[in-house]
Image (cartoon, rainbow, N blue to C red):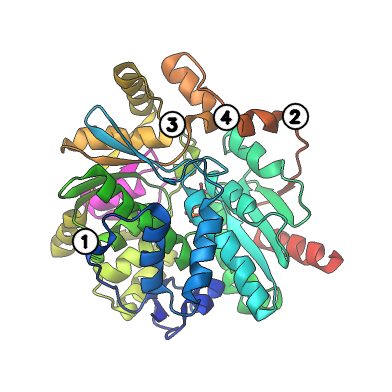
Amino acid sequence: MKYKSTRGGVSDLNFTDAFLMGLATDGGLIVPQTIPNVDLDNLRDLDYNNLAFEIFRLFIDDIPYNDLRTLIGKSYSTFDTQEVTPVVKKNGLFILELFHGPTFAFKDVALQFLGNLFEYVLKKRNTYVNVLGATSGDTGSAAIYGLKGKENINIFILHPHNKVSKVQELQMTTVEDVNVYNLAIEGTFDDCQAIVKSIFNDLKFKEKYHLAAVNSINWARILAQIVYYFYAYFKSGVDKAYFSVPTGNFGDIFAGYMAKRMGLPIEKLILATNSNDILYRFVNYGDYSTGKVVKTLSPSMDIQVASNFERYLYYLSDENSIRVKELMDEFTRTKKLKFEGDLLKKVQLDFESYRAGVEDTLATIKRFYEETGYIVDPHTAAGVFAAIKAGYRDVICLSTAHPAKFPDAIMDAIGAYPEKPRAISELEDKNKRMWVLGNSVDEVKKFIEKKLQKG
Ligand SMILES: N[C@@H](CCOP(=O)(O)O)C(=O)O
């Protein structure tokens, strides 16, 4: 399999080069040059690791199969269940539990694998990387847990200062390994993401410091997330699938879109947002225009500029890179895009979307708990809210995080705190380490330079 950029300036990369490049050097996002088709019957009865292997090998042909199997096995051995992403049925909905990894969020599914993949590739190539990423709460800790203490890797993670949950902040900032740098930026997640992209687009700086990406701009993230759509489909036993996906950066739901393009019978992807509703407006009205980021109960979704939107735009434009570049340039200039007519109808064939405000989120957590005894976190609640609104039978809701990451929201909803896994309760007594920086590309660059020169 070869890879290219959505903007047409990069092509014919093998998987490992695409993985190390992260953001394409022309500013676009990397996609596979063809989308492979799967035979569902060959995958149906596989356990998680074997399923992951069968899907990965369709996209990776420059890593020996034995090594790939070892990487997969190592990555998912840190999960608290061999199922990796179990599916449970509650009140007519399937809940795909994606929070069984070390940081209790769906990001672990990809980032445990990416951590091991970086280690493997760097050793093979006898080189090093400095990972740079942005987080609205979950990617950061998952990336840090995937990479902490690993040789030949430093990791710099930007998060919006005081805008992630307390547990999310503790998970990131209590890691004491010397290769981990937490930068709390005086701004929003969109500011953090813009800083990261601007630094990646400074190709001299990127090359000089061997920068690499862990956000879903990295194709390997999407690849790892495709697997659980297949797994959930087989486990649920449904004929045609409806997935409801809490959505911020569009990476998770885009993985579902790819699974559909590979032949998974997905009837509809239900896109759930919180009040940061740019994607809700896009799907319903063709209005992709940024608004102000507002703080909600589901901080990981407090995003207005969705990174992976560009990958979808590429497929929506029938893989026309020139058109994608024009649209992305227009978006950079005006902060808005408009979609109408047949193009919007095409979007609505793939997706439908609902927006859960704060009251909807709290009411959904409460009602679901009262009816099932099961506590969903505020992000999952947005997905459950959307699934109920959509009204289809047997929707598979992606449960993207453990409720203990958001105890205050749960207390507000049901009047009690969720049970805390030990790994979370232990965080409070640990030392914290982070650096507060202004919302400035230069400040972040200077910080990276200073730390790397010292090292
Ligand atoms: N919701 C994310 C934001 C970053 O998204 P990513 O999927 O591109 O890493 C978070 O929790 O950090």
| Magenta-highlighted residues | 271-292
Mark before the other along the chain sequence, 4 or 3 = 3
Mark before the other along the chain sequence, 4 or 1 = 1
Q: Quadrant of the C terminus?
A: bottom right
- Amino acid carrying label 2: it is Asp
- Amino acid carrying label 3: it is Asp
Give the residue drawn at x 41%, y 25%.
375
Label 3 residue near ligand 1, CB within 8 Å:
no
* x, y percent for residue 440: 66, 57
- Amino acid carrying label 4: it is Pro
Q: Secondary structure at mark 2?
A: helix
Give the residue drawn at x 44%, y 73%.
28
Residue 251 visible in the snapshot:
no
Label number found at residue 377: 3
Label 4 residue near ligand 1, CB within 8 Å:
no
Mark before the other along the chain sequence, 2 or 3 = 3
Q: Residue furthest right?
A: 454
Residue 372 visible in the snapshot:
yes
Q: Which residue in the structure is indicated by mark 4?
A: 421
Q: Which residue in the structure is indicated by mark 2?
A: 429
Label number found at residue 132: none
